[in-house]
Image: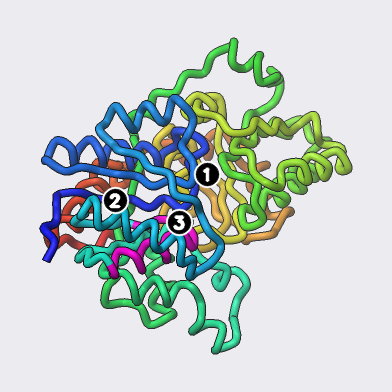
Amino acid sequence: MLERHKTVIHIYGGSPKKRGSLEEYFLLLTRTLRDRGWRSLFCFDRFPDEELLQAYIDCGAELNTLRTTKSRFDFSLIRAFYKLFRNKKPAVVNVHFGHTGINGLIAARLAGVKKCIWTKHSLDAISYKKKLPLHKRWLHTINYESLLATDIVAVSQAVKRELADHSITAKVQHFYLGIDLRRFSNGKDSPQKRETLSIPVDRPIVACISQARREKGIEILVRAVAQLKNMPYCPYVLIVGGGPLTNDLKILAAGLGVSSLLNFCGVRNDVDDILAMAGFTVLPSLEDAAPLALIESLAAGKPVIASRVGGIPEFIQDDVNGILVEPGDAAGLAAAITCLCTDAARLLRLRLGATASVERFDVRRGVEETIALYCGEGYRDAN
């Protein structure tokens, strides 16, 4: 029997694009584990940019690159992972994204790793494509990962419900990974940055922190702005995150005559400062598991207009710290935006609600829950 070291290997299944809240969770987790005598190794398909790479190194992480795959059974990748695990002898392998993770779980099992954790960060297509035929449901990737993992972390109750829909309950633990609350409560609204972003002085500022992907529903936001474009209170919207549909959305905005009201800011590392400029934020998702952008907004004291789908109602309480609207409803979204742009008293009340609702999403709590799982300690299910 191989002697297992106090080592955790994270299989990322991609490469981080920025130093966002998920990266802050990984960095704090790595520092905390290092202080307790653990080693952490991350497997990316390619290294992150220089600044983020240095941050990982500074907190004691080792980094490796192994390509991603679109195959559930990529034998060359399984072999590469197997060699890595036999060499490093980790106590824990924690997989995070994509089919790369399935191959990592297979290799970990073959290498005799006792603690094989699957952290499920998102809802699968079955959630927003509705029902699948029974044979496709039971051949779905979710079932392979659940069989291979010894433990499953559901990052929201919505993810836990999706697993339960596949009769996967026994291995599942739920807790929120959280964010660095202090970072987002200390953003700076500077005139220089407003000028750089071409922010007008005569309009409310709204932020949408989201990648432009189909399930994020940003097209609905563009159409909602088009409905408000002739109103004096129509906001100027900062869309932060980049994504594959960005050019399509720019074309749509031009066709609807609202290009001057939307700023596609791309991927940025200063989301805290963007939030400091905004009066509130919008997230018009068609489906979402546990969007950390919601917590970032709340930590900045900014209420959120968001869709009533997936895990979003776990974070946003209607008329307490934001407004919930139906997914895909541009008119409903436009009405909610109108409300917060014209009702200062309600906006202030929701801002206070945002600040009051965020404490349970502190990243330090998520890190301690994760370490308890690594060490095999019992912990409670988060609510």
| Residue placed furthest toward the top | 192
Residue 222 figure quarter: top right
Please name the residue shown 68% across and 42% down the image: 338
Q: Is residue 99 magenta?
A: yes
The kind of secondary structure the magenta stretch mainly shows is helix
The three-letter code of the residue at mark 3 reads Phe
Name which of mark 2 and mark 1 comes first in the sequence: 2
Q: On the rendered structure, is 114 left or right of 46?
A: left
Q: Are marks 3 and 2 in contact (CB under 8 Å)?
A: no
Seen in the picture, residue 251 relative to 168 is either above or below; the reply is above
Which residue matches tag 3?
Answer: 97
Real-space Cα separation, disc 3 to disc 1, in angstroms: 27 Å
Between residue 125 and residue 82, name the one nearer to us: 82
Callout 1 crowding tier (Cα within 10 Å): few <14, some 14–19, many ≥20: many
Q: Position of residue 358 (x, y in %)?
A: 35, 43
Callout 2 crowding tier (Cα within 10 Å): few <14, some 14–19, many ≥20: many
Can the viewer see residue 311? Answer: no
Real-space Cα separation, disc 2 to disc 1, in angstroms: 35 Å
Q: Are marks 3 and 1 in contact (CB under 8 Å)?
A: no
Please name the residue shown 64% across and 51% down the image: 213
Magenta stretch, residue numbers: 95-110
Callout 3 crowding tier (Cα within 10 Å): few <14, some 14–19, many ≥20: some
The three-letter code of the residue at mark 1 reads Val
Work out which quarter of the rendered image holds the C terminus and state it. Answer: bottom left
The three-letter code of the residue at mark 2 reads Ile
Q: Secondary structure at mark 3?
A: loop
Q: On the rendered structure, is 45 left or right of 194?
A: left
Please name the residue shown 62% across and 51% down the image: 284
Q: Secondary structure at mark 2?
A: strand
Which residue matches tag 1?
Answer: 304
Which residue matches tag 2?
Answer: 9
Name which of mark 3 and mark 1 comes first in the sequence: 3
